Amino acid sequence: MTLFAQSLPEFEAGWVWLAGAGPGDPGLLTLHAVNGLRQADVVVYDALVDKSILEWAKQDAVLDYAGKRGGKPSPNQRDITLKLIEYARAGKRVLRLKGGDPFVFGRGGEEALGLVEAGVPFRIIPGITAGIGGLAYAGIPATHRDCNQAVTFLTGHDQLGLAPDAINWDGIAKGSQVIVMYMAMKHLETIAGKLIAGGRSLDEPVCIVCNGSLDTQDVLETTLGRCAQDVAEAGLNPPAIVCVGEVVRLRSGLDWLGAMSGKVLQSDPLGLRSKSRQSDAG
């Protein structure tokens, strides 16, 4: 065993590790998460965790599915937290494996606070969130200094599954250069309408990334005015990330997966060189 492997933390009995599994591609799993999988007695995993990731679990580990999917029968959140507590109190090493990052729209904070209340020790293992990793696999950076100095991450539905009224859509529309939305497909038409009413252009670039980082990844480039219609016509379904902003234009130069399949990338997708030449000529 290498010195590095020896330095990885020991998973003690009676502990819960809340780990992020990343956006889908098993290769994006962190070493800490793999270490947890190799030691866990119980793995409580979500719907968006790729099944091949579970192959890292030790042979006699209990694999307990606790996935939540919109519109389908799902475990109650309180029941999931109680399950973690019960396993830990029984002396098990419990890995709670969640898609993306457990603290980014993943209810990890709720579960951790439940463990605190129950006196159960825990560790947090961050993961690559889909709003960054999924976009990167589509060739879209969340930030680029020629496009944006700020990015807003938001959820497209509230606790009741409705478009969230608590969000200041007018403020987001006016103040955020790039908007990255989780769980927004169901209410995309409503959300797009609110952003347009807040001052965003009908022609602003929008990209929808479904199944980001997986072999089944599907990417649709559209505009804010047409996004809901185009999604419906394309028959796209969640899980998906929706990105609004000028960074979407960078995909024509940064679609590295497309380049692997022969796509010719643009070296200046924002047209900055041509603008610079025009400025010099003037």
Image: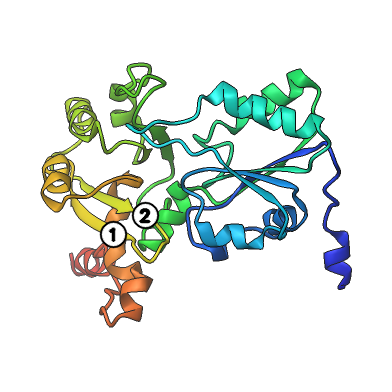
Residue tagged by mark 1? 218
Q: Pick whichever of labels 1 and 2 is earlier in the sequence.
A: 2
- Quadrant of the drawing holding the C terminus: bottom left
The total of numbered circles placed on residues is 2
Q: Looking at the image, which residue is at 30% across and 80% down?
A: 261
Circle 2 residues within 10 Å: few <14, some 14–19, many ≥20: many
For the residue labelled by badge 1, is the local secondary structure a helix, a strand or a loop? Answer: strand
Q: Give residue 75's position: percent from left, percent from top.
A: 50, 29
Residue type at numbered disc 2 = Asn
Name which quarter of the figure residue 91 lies in: top right
Locate residue 25 relative to residue 174 in the image: left or right.
Answer: right
Locate residue 146 relative to residue 94 in the image: left or right.
Answer: left
Q: Nearer the viewer, residue 95 or 244?
A: 95
Rendered view: 72 above or below 119: below
Q: Nearer the viewer, residue 89 or 145?
A: 89
Query: Which residue is at the far front?
Result: 60
Q: Nearer the viewer, residue 94 or 187?
A: 94
Q: Is residue 195 visible?
A: yes
Rendered view: 209 above or below 94: below
Do the numbered discs 1 and 2 sit on residues whose CB atoms are within 8 Å?
yes
Residue type at numbered disc 1 = Asp
Rendered view: 120 above or below 225: above
Q: Give residue 69's position: percent from left, percent from top.
A: 40, 37
For the residue labelled by badge 2, is the local secondary structure a helix, a strand or a loop? Answer: loop
Residue tagged by mark 2? 211
Between the C-alphas of marks 1 and 2, the distance is 7 Å
- Quadrant of the drawing holding the N terminus: bottom right
Q: Looking at the image, which residue is at 17% across and 50% down?
A: 235
Q: Looking at the image, which residue is at 65% across and 58% down?
A: 30
Q: Nearer the viewer, residue 196 or 117?
A: 117
